[in-house]
Amino acid sequence: MKNKSPTNLVIVESPTKARTISRFLGSDFVVDSSFGHIRDLPTSQLGVDVEKNFEPKYVIPRKAAPRVKKLKEEARRAERVILATDEDREGEAIAWHLVGGKKRTRARTKPKAVIARIVFHEITRNAIQEALKNPRDIDLNLVDAQQARRILDRLVGYKLSPFLWKKIYRGLSAGRVQSVAVRLIVEREREIQQFQKQEYWTVDAELEPQDIKNKKDGQFRATLVKINDKALEKFAIPNEEAARDITAKLENVMWRVAHIEQRAVQKNPFPPYTTSTLQQDAFRRLGHSAKQTMMLAQQLYEGLDLGERGGVGLITYMRTDSLNLSEEALRGAHEFLKDHVGEKYTLPTPRRYKTKSKGAQEAHEAIRPTDPFRTPDVVAPYLEQRQLELYELIWRRFIATQMPAAVFDANTIDVHATKENKSDMYTFRASGQILRFDGFLKVYPLKFTETGLPILQPDDPLSLLQLIPLQHFTEPPPRYTEASLVKALEKYGIGRPSTYAPTIATIQDRRYVERIERRQLSPTETGFLVNDLLVAHFPEIVDVQFTARIEEELDEIASGEKQWQPVIREFYEPFAAHLAVKYEEVEKQHTDEMTEGKCEKCGKPMVIKHGRFGRFLACSGFPECKNTKAIKKEPETIGMKCLKCGEGEIIKKFTKRKRLFFGCSRYPKCNFASWKDPRQKESEG
């Protein structure tokens, strides 16, 4: 007797996800993967018929053809085909392509075979079984939103990139979202370049109680905040002369406690992670790029083998901007805290968070562990180090959301300094805080400083130990890091959770932006060139508000409020007309710079050219002579002699991974090297 073939075919995107799900299903199920998209726009042509209402011309990529053939064979043998791709626009589009882009999603592949769509937020036995009980149709609104994004991005990239080739040089590219991200980084760099630092001073007083009993541990520091009841603005003391004038007036004055304020301050836990906040926190705490974070999160979501426990998804779906938490998850967190942390660390009612993002779907969840009792210690033996670190971050953040606030005792002491005639009154203020109850900090530690103040009463006399005038300078705005760029993209409504990491990776891969010291993002010369041309001639394409408005329209397509073709047409028709005009108007950007050097091959002058990898030297006799050379950069000195040999200059250097360090200009004769800026050591000394 022949074995009965499986009657249910479940299709997902990845083999890892397929392996995990197959462990939860019986022998009448076979689970296979599509390895991502099985249909896409062609790479060799536009692939969009502008004349036919922007109809996309999808093709099966060559590498996907064997996979499609296998899935078709499996589908012919099945009575039911179950599409279990991710529940977002990309996953919905993959499901739609798997059925050949049919409008009727319950189409039959043979007389008995039906097609069903199931969705879930976590890959666990309960979630999969619940999803199988509640199949639905493919959501064509989500498919249309994905198509609209794909077509918009293709139209901009395919039409605008050749313009850049013609007007600057070949190999450049433009993108609807990437070009806006580059603009943010370029504009921040120009702010830094144009920044003029401004000097200002503050005056501190080191004081102690005159009462002998309070002198032990009674010293504290207060800062001048008012003169004659007028609050000091930041630049009220502009220079050293003004600061010294104040300290001179504070000679032979009486110091007394004027006012004491004591209050309890609560610090609430952060909301659970969304895609954006996970990428930001993983960058700050673990040093991961957005791309690395999403790769690791995908592994945790799709499932890892936990030995005898088998394979299971450890976290919920990682592309989300929702803060929603399921009732089951809230109950699980409460039970875990009661059993393993203590009753005082539980809440009487669950803490729920309201999603602020306009396009977020409340049916989705925040990123959380699938089982609160599956602690980092439990999974540690089965995970790689980086997987474990990210899982622990997610687990701790979620558990903390259901814990009480941390409570600090915050104290403020105002001190009056006056002469006997009370002609002028100077108010100094000291602030301190002591942790009274750790609350959520027990599970989710944060850095904070505890500063104790002596126990004092109003009118207590004080003794001045010293006055400390301090010089300060305003700081330029910081360069973007991957974390702060993700935050900015989300704040301005540029892109969506699924696009942050690819956008940041793309602008670095295409060398419009590079990572420099402290993992900051800085525009390359190519980035400046392309951005300036686009800002000058295609301001809408790189306009933050315009790009955000398109994102809102994509959300409206996803919710069924708008049709996708009119949205594309409204964008494309003026864009295409404007592009045609600019092809005629804009002259080729002559970026070549003449040098005094001669080509050693033909004797003609060498010129500085701009290429994808930055500036380089080339022969002006091109194309007859194709001689090129790299430009040797002069090292940047910091104005200090080498601390080791005393002869060379200390210069800035970079490792292959772009990490800054300091070395001697006489290397290799002198091997001095330091991660720390030697100027800091000098000022400390």
Image: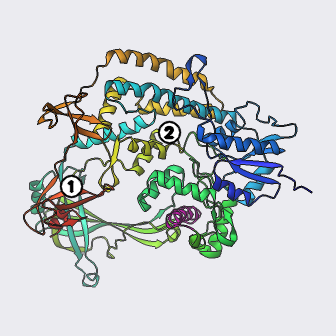
Q: Quadrant of the C terminus?
A: bottom left
Per the image, is 298 magenta?
no
Residue 119 visible in this rendered orientation of the protein = no
Drawn side of residue 69 relative to residue 5, left or right: left
Residue bearing mark 2:
495
Q: Position of residue 241 (x, y in %)?
A: 8, 55
Q: Quadrant of the N terminus?
A: bottom right
* Picture quadrant of residue 175: top left
Circle 2 Cα neighbour tier, 10 Å, few/some/many (<14 / 14–19 / ≥20): many
Residue bearing mark 1:
228
Furthest-bottom residue in this view: 213
Q: Are marks 2 and 1 in contact (CB under 8 Å)?
A: no
Drawn side of residue 580 relative to residue 559, left or right: left
> What's the magenta region?
383-404
Local SS, label 2? loop
Furthest-right residue in this view: 1
- Which residue is at 27% across, 71% downward? 459
Q: In this orientation, which residue lies closer to the viewer: 99 or 257?
A: 99
